[in-house]
Image (cartoon, rainbow, N blue to C red):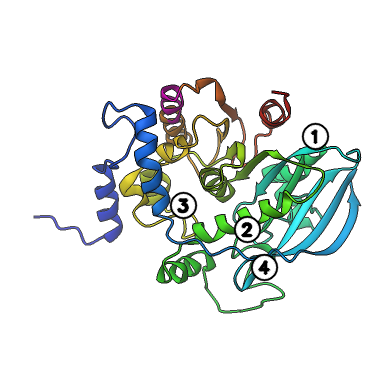
């Protein structure tokens, strides 16, 4: 008998036969019944959320950049933790005017939200912007929206390996370490980051130039993960753009090892696959960006994810609210349909 001693191969073989318990289409139930029974079970995998605290906002700086007015704030987002909050707005907003606002989640990387919001002050940040079309928080503000962002834990200003924190332990993967910390306390990194994002949205809604009824969310890669969960957990988000985060858990996660503790919740894949998770956003408008040459989320399984997502949106009676930007680049923001998408669903008059 040929024995297997590889744990990795064991997991790969388990997932080949795995059928999530709440996958859409497993039975003949309607979308409404599926959504009603699946959503609470999926949200329960996140564990506890940190409690909300007063924001205690503090303005650090205000400056102009490329025709935009930008501000940097400190806000408290949960017990014992703050975040730097960046907001970009067009300079042509008139007194008393309200604009739609978009929460812009960053992906993995040491700079967090900074390049997303337009910081090209170093060759490294400028290179990320050029390679990933990464400054969507800047570009969408140039298109007339208010955009805002914070870092998730472990990135940007909240990276424990960077100033002002400087914990120089070698080989630390903060995404995985924070996940271990969080699950020991009954939380997850996702529940923590989603709660912090909701606090950021609370603060964004205090600005007189933000239309609180017209909020959206977008993000690339790990930011696509955060976009998915932010929209699921915060019904204020009226439209979402998930950028280069379409795939199947068995492919990008188990097979390709392309995930970390910032992107998972205990028992999630037991219940649903990624297209089911995204399908719980129906019937809200959703734009999916897929890079044809993406090496993080490969095209074959990315399109398989989208096809299943399309079936879910069709079953929800919302096929016309699901949009695809399939673009001939690698892992990046397509940006071909974003302005029209958010204009249609956030700026068009009812």
Distance between mark 4 and mark 1 Cα atoms: 30 Å
Q: Quarter of the image holding residue 141?
A: top right
Which residue was labeled with disc 1?
143
Which residue was labeled with disc 2?
109
Distance between mark 2 and mark 3 Cα atoms: 14 Å
Precedes in sequence: disc 2 or disc 4: 4
On the question of residue 116 being in view, the answer is no
Q: Label 4: state its secondary structure.
A: strand
Residue 6 as seen in the image, left or right of residue 167:
left
In the displayed orientation, state which residue is furthest to the left: 1
Query: Looking at the rendering, in which quadrant would you find the C terminus?
Result: top right
Q: Quarter of the image holding residue 54?
A: bottom right
| Of residues 99 and 326, the one drawn nearer to the viewer in this rendering | 99
Q: Quarter of the image holding residue 250?
A: top left
Precedes in sequence: disc 4 or disc 1: 4
Which residue was labeled with disc 3?
258
Which residue was labeled with disc 4?
82
Please, is residue 28 above or below residue 7 in the view? above
Q: Label 3: state its secondary structure.
A: loop
Q: Return the x and y of residue 152 as percentages of the image width and height.
A: 61, 59
């Amino acid at each position: 008998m040929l024995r297997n001693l590889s744990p990795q191969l064991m997991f790969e073989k388990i997932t080949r036969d795995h059928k999530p318990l709440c996958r859409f289409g497993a039975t003949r139930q309607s979308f409404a019944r599926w959504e009603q029974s699946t959503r609470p079970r999926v949200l329960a995998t996140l564990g506890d959320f940190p409690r909300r605290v007063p924001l205690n906002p503090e303005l650090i700086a205000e400056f102009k950049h490329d025709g935009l007015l930008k501000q940097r704030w400190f806000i408290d987002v949960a017990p014992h933790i703050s975040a730097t909050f960046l907001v970009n707005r067009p300079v042509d907003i008139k007194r008393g005017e309200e604009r739609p606002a978009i929460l812009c989640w960053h992906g993995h990387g040491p700079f967090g939200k900074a390049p997303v919001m337009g910081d090209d002050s170093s060759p490294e940040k400028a290179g990320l912007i050029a390679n990933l079309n990464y400054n969507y928080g800047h570009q969408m503000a140039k298109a007339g929206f208010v955009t805002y962002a914070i870092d998730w834990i472990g990135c940007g200003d909240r990276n424990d390996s960077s100033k002002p924190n400087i914990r120089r332990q070698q080989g630390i993967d903060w995404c995985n370490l924070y996940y271990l910390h969080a699950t020991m306390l009954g939380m997850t990194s996702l529940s923590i980051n989603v709660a912090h994002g909701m606090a950021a949205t609370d603060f964004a809604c205090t600005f007189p130039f933000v239309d609180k009824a017209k909020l959206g969310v977008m993000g690339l890669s790990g930011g696509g993960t955060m976009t998915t969960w932010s929209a699921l957990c915060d019904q204020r988000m009226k439209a979402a753009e998930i950028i280069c985060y379409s795939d199947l858990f068995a492919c990008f996660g188990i097979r390709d090892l392309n995930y970390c503790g910032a992107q998972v919740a205990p028992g999630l894949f037991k219940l649903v696959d990624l297209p089911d998770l995204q399908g719980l956003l129906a019937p809200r408008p959703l734009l999916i960006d897929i890079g044809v040459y993406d090496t993080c989320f490969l095209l074959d399984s990315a399109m398989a994810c989208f096809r299943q997502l399309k079936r879910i949106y069709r079953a929800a009676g919302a096929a016309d609210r699901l949009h695809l930007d399939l673009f001939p680049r690698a892992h990046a923001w397509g940006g071909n349909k974003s302005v029209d998408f958010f204009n249609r669903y956030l700026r068009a008059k009812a």
